[in-house]
Image (cartoon, rainbow, N blue to C red):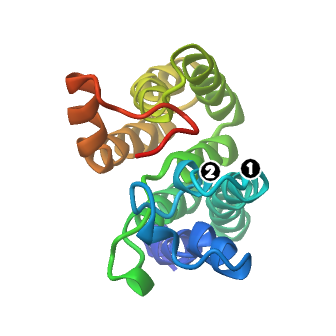
Amino acid sequence: MPPESYILLGYLFGAIPFGLLLTRAAGLGDIRSIGSGNIGATNVLRTGRKGLAAATVLLDGLKGAAAVLIAGYLAGEDAALWAGLGAILGHLFPVWLRFRGGKGVATGYGVLLAAAWPVGLAAGAIWLAVAGLARMSSLAALISFAVAPILAALLADFGVVKLALAIAVLVFIRHHANIRRLLAGTEPRIGGKA
């Protein structure tokens, strides 16, 4: 199988909507009907269930990492990078949810950690620092993913740079409404209502 074909494996992993599944299993209904309507951890946190939000972050990150690690084990680094891209695309545009998924933050960190752990770790640390100071998940994500390709250029190879750049572009596209609210000064803070 050519390395590019592992994008499908990654997509299938990424398309698992853990935020939706966990909130439904907890009896909270459809997470898409509250807050921002997103299936990601920040919106799950708006239910007041911190444990569910933490589980969503963990599982969304693990699905991205698993796609990269499995493809890498089966077919090498190029396949791993394609699977990582597929995992992000699957999370953002899951076929099961009419292509309306999350924003790719936790899955993106999982992919980066598995593809080049120093890059993923540094990007995640930047998210934690910005989120801690500004109390805005979207701002933290945008800054950390904007810096991720630079981190990859310093800490990894060119394949990871391209992957980090692709993830950054996709994360920025999915955060277009957040960017407008950030510019308008109306973006909600972590734990607040959308």
| Left or right: where 43 falls relative to 165 | right
The kind of residue tagged 1 is: Lys
Dot 2 crowding, Cα within 10 Å, few <14, some 14–19, many 20+: many
Could you tell me residue 50's position as x and y percent? 74, 50
Count of marks placed on residues: 2
| Left or right: where 49 falls relative to 80 | right
In front here: 110 or 136? Answer: 136
Q: Secondary structure at mark 2?
A: helix
| Left or right: where 20 falls relative to 185 | right
Query: In the image, is residue 28 above or below residue 92?
Result: below
- Residue found 55% across the figure and 76% down from its top: 9
Where residue 100 sits, quadrant-wise, is bottom left
Q: Secondary structure at mark 1?
A: helix
Query: Residue 45, labelled with which disc?
Result: 2
Of labels 2 and 1, earlier in sequence is 2
- Residue found 59% across the figure and 48% down from its top: 106
Q: Which residue is mark 1?
A: 50
In front here: 155 or 64? Answer: 64
- Residue found 52% across the figure and 80% down from its top: 1
C-beta proximity under 8 Å, tags 2 and 1: yes
Could you tell me residue 24's position as x and y percent? 64, 80
Could you tell me residue 41's position as x and y percent? 59, 53
Where residue 128 sits, quadrant-wise, is top right
Query: In the image, is residue 36 above or below residue 129?
Result: below
